[in-house]
Image (spheres, helix red, strand yellow):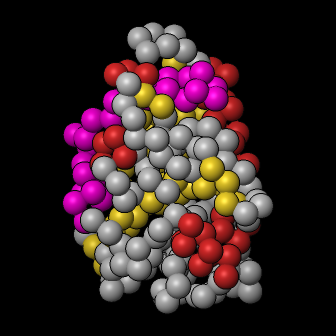
Amino acid sequence: MYSATMIYACPGMCGVSGQVGKGVGVSHCDNRVDHLSAVSPWRGDVRIISRALAAMSVVCAFAVGCSGAGNTEESSVNVTAEESPVPGSPLLASVAEQIALPARTWTASGTHTAKGYTSATAEITSVEGMRADCDNVNLNKKLAADFRGDVFGAGMKGFFYRCENVGADTNEYWFTISSADQGQIDQLCDPTTVYPIVRDVQRDTYWVDEPFACTSRIGPA
């Protein structure tokens, strides 16, 4: 259920192709779907997002005028009170502006798994592609300005901040995703939502996203 106030700290998942300024990677979604070889809406390299942003990986105040930080239990970075980002941070305001983060959003956090393959037939595991994707998430974090637009339509903002290889063919990802449309968050957290296979051109890996397990959901104030 939704509780009050908080805008997520947004890695998200959009064919990463852009870079804002120096040091903050922002992915731009190419929503073209080419049967089973659609360009992946979030895989690929995203350059370094500062530790201040990474520390806010679970629900933090992000946009201009939002309230203070939320629960960071799942964050992969340990942050003291003195290091925690504060409302009105110029860095966070800049990122929020670049990804067009709405002032009022519904937000979900949790984990999900994905499998990487060497072809659209999804028969042979792409071991190297899966390893490289996990390394990139853990090192650089991932920010998506339009997460899985092929499934949800425009407007989903995604942040992926931790990855673990949990099986020979499976990666697990920790996420925080926000939208101004409550229906999109409901669809994200629905275990029956289907995600078409998509291709990460950079790593030549075909990905099957599995259902998103939402462990927390927060609504606008």
Q: Residue at x 30, y 59 (%)?
A: 185
Please count the marks in the image: 0
Q: Residue at x 66, y 48 (%)?
A: 46
Q: Position of residue 106 (x, y in %)?
A: 33, 70
Quick check: 45 left or right of 8? Answer: right
Residue 88: in magenta span: no
Residue 113 versus residue 184 in the image, above or below: above
Quick check: 31 left or right of 46? Answer: left
Q: Nearer the viewer, residue 147 or 28?
A: 28
Q: Residue at x 36, y 78 (%)?
A: 104
Q: Position of residue 206 (x, y in %)?
A: 50, 23
Q: Position of residue 165 (x, y in %)?
A: 60, 34
In the orientation shown, which residue stands out farthest toward the right?
22
Q: Position of residue 191 (x, y in %)?
A: 26, 43
Quadrant placement of the N terminus: bottom left
Image quarter for residue 205?
top right
Residue 109 versus residue 45 in the image, above or below: below
Magenta stretch?
182-207
Residue 39 versus residue 63 in the image, above or below: above
Residue 99 versus residue 91 in the image, above or below: above
Quadrant placement of the C terminus: bottom left
Q: Residue at x 74, y 86 (%)?
A: 82
